[in-house]
Image (tube, rainbow, N blue to C red):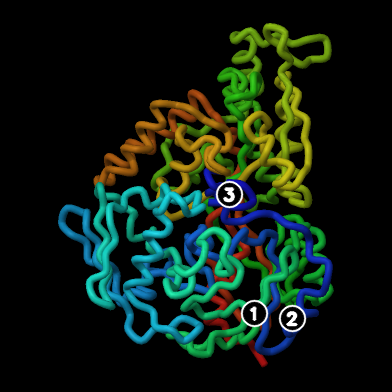
Amino acid sequence: MTGRSIRGAVAVALATVLSLTAAACSQPGGSGGDSGSGAGDSAVVGIAYEPDSLSPLLGYGKDGNSKIFDGLLALDAHMGLRPALATALPAVSADGLTYTYKLRRGVKFSDGKPFGAKDVVFTYRTILDEKTNNASRTELDAVRSVEASGDDTVVFTLKYPYAPFAQRTVLPIAPEHVAGRQDVNTGAFTTRPIGTGPYLLTKWSKGEKLSFRANPDYWGGAPKVKKFTMAIIKDDDVRATRLRSGELDGAILPPNLAKGFARGSGTRTYAATTYDYRTVTLPTHNKVAGDTAIRRALDVAVDREAMVASILNGEGRPAYGPVPTDSEWFAKGTERAHDLTAAQKILDDAGWKPGKDGIRSKDGVRAAFPLWYLTGDKLRQDHALAYASDAKKAGIDITTEAGTWEVIEPRMKQDAVLAGGGSPADPDFDQYTLLKSSLAGDGFNNMAWYDNKAVDQALEAGRRSGDKAARKAAYDTVQRELVKNPGYTFLTHIDHLYVVKDRFGALTTQVEPHDHGLASGPWWNVEDWTPKK
């Protein structure tokens, strides 16, 4: 749930799937054989984050759209599952414990070697191996075994009827003949991947760009965009400037910068609905942030509606938990209104008394703690400043600090962080790594070290039940427990805004997770684009 996967925050989450890096310092199309912006069969887009690794065995592309790889299944424009390396959706046994996939024949990896069932078995078994540094391993906890039946059939046997299992099989398949012959955590495959996807990686300049060329032998047909470059530019303002100057064909931008690109400027703006939330972690090990009264007071002191209006320019919604209010999984009645008087009463009743400067204290402990946000991320900065301002009105002194993940990560156990997360696929995908007490301290999983036995039990019930009504009741319990003891202050669910040159025609977006820009955005299906000449 960080700028990377939330990795229990995001890896995302969330495995440490994405991490923020330095802004690009050179022309995104200026080296490595890439065409610059404006070439008829090329595209250069600006994104904010880059992956830690390009190996699906370590978490890359686990939610689909990896470009270099394919999964057994993929997500369409409406977030429905469709076949990819499998020929059809899986056949599921009556007890929900066996999933059988028939595989597409004639598919080859980019090195010309054939794809087959052994590669699927290798991929899943390797991810489940405790020696593999994949922080998202718990997402496959339901898998008891994965076996090949001939070259074109794979059978998964589950420990319990895990309802969203098919959605987990969008994760990319790695070639056994390459990745299986080297160290899974440090081998060359992590930076020089070979897959079955529509694009081949030609160069990865760390902190600057990822360069791809179309796979001419792609089983789904060779892409018409022959060269595709993702320029890694962490600073929002720099990304907007480079798009305006013509260096980029498209970019993800915060609302205040996206609105600067008016209609008729040769660009189109796309708004993608998301599950992407911004939240403040309230570490259990911090004497102030871990206090239940402080947590409850902050939960009602914060003015979420004002954040949506002033920070997001209306491009988003108030967030009361990881589940958006318009989701079928949202627990009605868990909305919290902005109420400063109620916040002050909570603190008064708990013995947090205001001092001469208005800041409260209890038993000699001052109601103060630091809040970190990522350098260059204007949305996080604005959320952090607004949160600190609201908190001070209740008598809580929050000092905002900017830093890179290298600076922030060692402090997460004690210091608050303006984090992000969210997954649209299933409530288990996001809530388990975010809240499960046993995952506290596991990379970016459960960044707040939240510990609530009722939540732990409900998360297990939601994960293990095959009955939707029972699962809804479990996740309702989770959301109601977060009202009683909010280990995080959820602020907003933000829409993602992208500005793209109109020479690519009318594009589409999906409902997006937190991890955006790299695999999401209007270029989620760049392999299907037809650029205007």
Say left or right for 262 vs 70.
right
Location of residue 291 by image quarter:
top right
Q: Residues within 10 Å of mark 2 (few under 14, many from 20)?
A: some
Whether residue 520 is visible, yes or no, is: no
User: Alpha-carbon distance for marks 2 and 1?
Assistant: 8 Å
Location of residue 464 by image quarter:
top left
* Residue 4 image position (x, y, % from top left): 61, 52
Determine which residue is flagged by label 1. Answer: 202
- The amino acid marked with disc number 2 is Gly
Say left or right for 381 vs 327.
right
Asked whether the residues under the numbered discs 1 and 3 touch, taking CB atoms below 8 Å apart as contact, a structural biologist would say no
Q: Residues within 10 Å of mark 1 (few under 14, many from 20)?
A: some
Whether residue 196 is visible, yes or no, is: yes
Q: What residue sits 74% from the left and 42% below the top?
A: 407
Asked whether the residues under the numbered discs 2 and 1 touch, taking CB atoms below 8 Å apart as contact, a structural biologist would say yes
Residue 34's place in the image compared with 511, above or below, is below
Determine which residue is flagged by label 3. Answer: 10
- The amino acid marked with disc number 3 is Val
Determine which residue is flagged by label 2. Answer: 32
470 vs 129, nearest the viewer: 129
* Residue 74 image position (x, y, % from top left): 42, 69
Say left or right for 143 vs 415.
left
Say left or right for 392 vs 69.
right
Given this view, does label 1 or label 3 mark the residue nearer the observer?
1
User: Alpha-carbon distance for marks 1 and 3?
Assistant: 27 Å
**Under tag 2, what secondary structure?**
loop
Q: What residue sits 44% from the left and 63% below the top?
A: 171
Quarter of the image with the C terminus in it:
bottom right
Given this view, does label 3 or label 2 mark the residue nearer the observer?
2
User: Alpha-carbon distance for marks 3 and 2?
Assistant: 30 Å
Q: Residues within 10 Å of mark 3 (few under 14, many from 20)?
A: many
